[in-house]
Amino acid sequence: MALTAVIRVPSRALLRPWARLRDAALGWIEPAGGGGVEVSAQRFASQKVLVEPDPAAGVAVMKFKNPPVNSLSLELLTELVISLEKLENDKTVRGVVLTSDCPGIFSAGLDLTEMCGRNPAHYAEYWKAVQEMWLRLYLSNLVLVAAINGASPAGGCLIALTCDYRVMADNPKYCIGLNETLLGIVAPFWFKDNLVNTIGHRASERALQLGLLFPPTEALQVGMVDKVVPKDQVQSTALSVLAQWMAIPDHARQLTKNMMRKPTADRLLKQRDADIQNFVSFISRDSIQKSLQMYLEKLKQKKG
Ligand SMILES: CCCCC/C=C\C/C=C\CC/C=C/CC(=O)SCCNC(=O)CCNC(=O)[C@H](O)C(C)(C)COP(=O)(O)OP(=O)(O)OC[C@H]1O[C@@H](n2cnc3c(N)ncnc32)[C@H](O)[C@@H]1OP(=O)(O)O
């Protein structure tokens, strides 16, 4: 594949696992001889995130593709952030539909195998990637519409909540919500803030404590989604909604979005490192590891 640019990267960054993963996903190759700070950038070919641009319409459809359930692995998170950054920098794109390539599942949320039986350094790296995904989506200048074409628990719900509008398929088997308490874990404050900003304080308190997973009609009632449509109309409806939002001048809409969201994002930005430390010490507890292991086991036994 043709080289498109030469980029100068601090050699320190190449040593960090997160940076290494990003560089690998981007196709950045350290030149032979090592010690190099100059790397070559190739056109990004993603595997876990499919991006279908429509430059004429000024939109793109981003599909998560991490079968069987689109769990948010470190790899998927990395590709998601890179793909979004690419779209943010593409002057022909003003809006994006986020959806899934996995039948019946929008996303199963954070990858439990990234949070179980690993070491503290891995937990820290993983949590930083989760924070990054949320911050990038939540503060995106693009219009983001979620086309929720399947189950959307926990982290899956969080992705949908970062969007400006949510369209959900009307299958009662598809549920959406922040169900962390059912796993014996606690939704971080920024998950909670995002939910409160969407459905209000009282509804959030009930939903979070009980770990409620709402079927589409209930999700619509509580305000967790904005529209419920037949499954085969989810993406087309999301694209129509996108066109409506894109009729507003970008600068005015973007400044308004930023005014509404920045205080919430700033709460995390001010304490990212402390939040990582909290996560690492919480998730490393024996009791929490036991709960997560049992939950994973239950998921696996469900089949047998
Ligand atoms: C006071 C101090 C506070 C400090 C707080 C600080 C920090 C906070 C700490 C922690 C917060 C962490 C936040 C976590 C948020 C999350 O997102 S946790 C993940 C929650 N997700 C779920 O509960 C969903 C679980 N999955 C399902 O319900 C179902 O799988 C499904 C999505 C509804 C699909 O069902 P289906 O029948 O189609 O598929 P299977 O269930 O058979 O699954 C297939 C296969 O996939 C595996 N799997 C499913 N979900 C996950 C997952 N999330 N991660 C990894 N793997 C998953 C499942 O085990 C099967 O595997 P197989 O048997 O090996 O094929």
Image (spheres, rainbow, N blue to C red):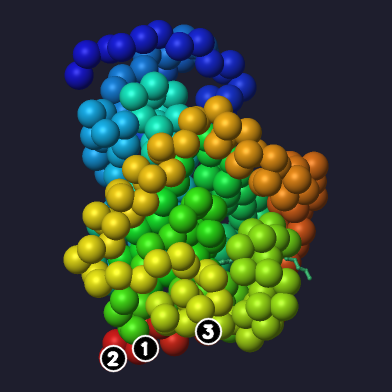
Mark 1 lies on a secondary structure that is helix
90 over 205 or under it: above or below: above
Q: Secondary structure at mark 3?
A: helix
Numbered mark located on residue 294 in the image: 3
3 or 2: tag closer to the N-terminus: 3
Rendered location of residue 150, percent (x, y): 33, 70
| Rendered position, 270 above or below 33 | below
Going by the image, does 198 lie left or right of 99?
right
Quarter holding the N terminus is top left
Instruction: Give the residue at mark 2.
Output: 304
For label 2, count other residues whose C-alpha is less than 10 Å away and answer few (under 14), some (14-19) or many (20+).
Answer: few
Check disc 2 and report its element: helix, strand or loop.
Answer: loop
Q: Toward which corner of the image does residue 257 lie, by quadrant?
A: top right
- On whether ligand 1 comes within 8 Å of the CB at mark 2, the answer is no
Q: Residue at x 36, y 71 (%)?
A: 228
Residue 104 as seen in the image, left or right of residue 301: left
**C-alpha separation, residue under disc 2 versus residue under disc 1:** 5 Å
Foreground residue, 201 or 193? 201
Give the quadrant of residue 93: top left
The amino acid beneath tag 3 is Met
